[in-house]
Image (cartoon, rainbow, N blue to C red):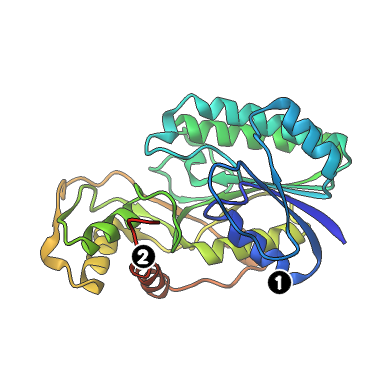
Amino acid sequence: METVLVTGASGFLGKRVIEQLLKTQEYRVTAVVSGRRPVEFPAGVQVEKCNLLDEAARTELTERVRPDILCHLAWGQESPDYRRLPENLQWLEAGLSLLRKFAASNGRRFIFAGSCTEYDDRSGKAQEDPQTQVMSLYGECKRAFYRVMENFCRIEGIQYVDARLFTLYGGGDPHRFGAIPSTILSFMEKKPVTCKSPNTVRDYVYIEDAAKAVALLIGSDYCGAVNISSGFPLSMRSIFKWIAREMGCEHLLSFENEGVCNQVLVGDNHILREVVGFDSFTPFEAGMRETIQWWRSKNLLNF
């Protein structure tokens, strides 16, 4: 039985990836958390508190756990402007250090949480070999990690994956500043909502689907970049209108910049479907209804 080390385990995606891994009963799972917020994991999960930005802590963790597989999901995303913060450079350095230490401990397979921001958001249908300009420091650091990881892992004989996650949604999203949670929360409080980019087109992925896809990649032999995307284009206008209609708040919704349309980013997911073998896509309406229900079930003042 192999050991899987999951960083960012207390995050939006991490907890669900661990749940999927436990269902297989094929792994010993070690969850790495920062300790900043309380979190409970299912029985059988080994929990390790570690500041991944600390060199000594990273070294001690990898030397002691010696994972066969490392699923690196951790990256600083705590504020709305995370895409341009200098902290992205710290996380890039920390990730590359963790990769080196993983290789030194004879690790076999490294899964990295890449991002759709590795593409230009004017790319249209994005394939895994982007030639476009990255539009943020966050995206540039993610792409830089992949480039180094690809070359380093080939030299070291390590399997590697850049799981390029498109926009995630679902219950439990800690980023209230995101378009979907902030809109749901505003409608729950009967506050007006203005959609400022109605013609922007995005590719939204239900969080449970993303977790299943990452777990599948952990157990596969696929190497390289792969888009974790639905492949289904949705305009922000259609998303906001659907939420408003579902919550009976159409009278609270308005739009700005309706004549502007310069951002289209949808993932080409043929590798995920045809090579990796993932076919468990939740329809947007079903996923969104579950998301709204999750928020409604919470006491928001105490969440």
Regarding residue 52, the answer to whether it shows in the image is: yes
Secondary structure of the residue carrying numbered label 2: helix
Q: Is residue 290 left or right of residue 197?
A: right
Q: Position of residue 46 (x, y in %)?
A: 75, 54
How many numbered marks, from 0 up? Answer: 2
| Number of the label disc, if any, that sits on residue 23 | 1
Residues 17 and 138: in front is 17
| Number of the label disc, if any, that sits on residue 295 | 2
Q: Which residue is depicted at the point 59% across and 62% down? A: 16
| Number of the label disc, if any, that sits on residue 133 | none
Residue 68 vertical placement versus 233 (above, below): above
Q: Is residue 33 left or right of residue 118?
A: right
Residues 224 and 7: in front is 7
Secondary structure of the residue carrying numbered label 1: helix
Q: Position of residue 63 (x, y in %)?
A: 85, 37
Q: Which residue is depicted at the point 52% across and 57% down? A: 268
For disc 1, the neighbor class at 10 Å (few under 14, some 14 to 19, many from 20) is few
The three-letter code of the residue at mark 1 reads: Lys
The single residue placed furthest to the left in the displayed view is 251
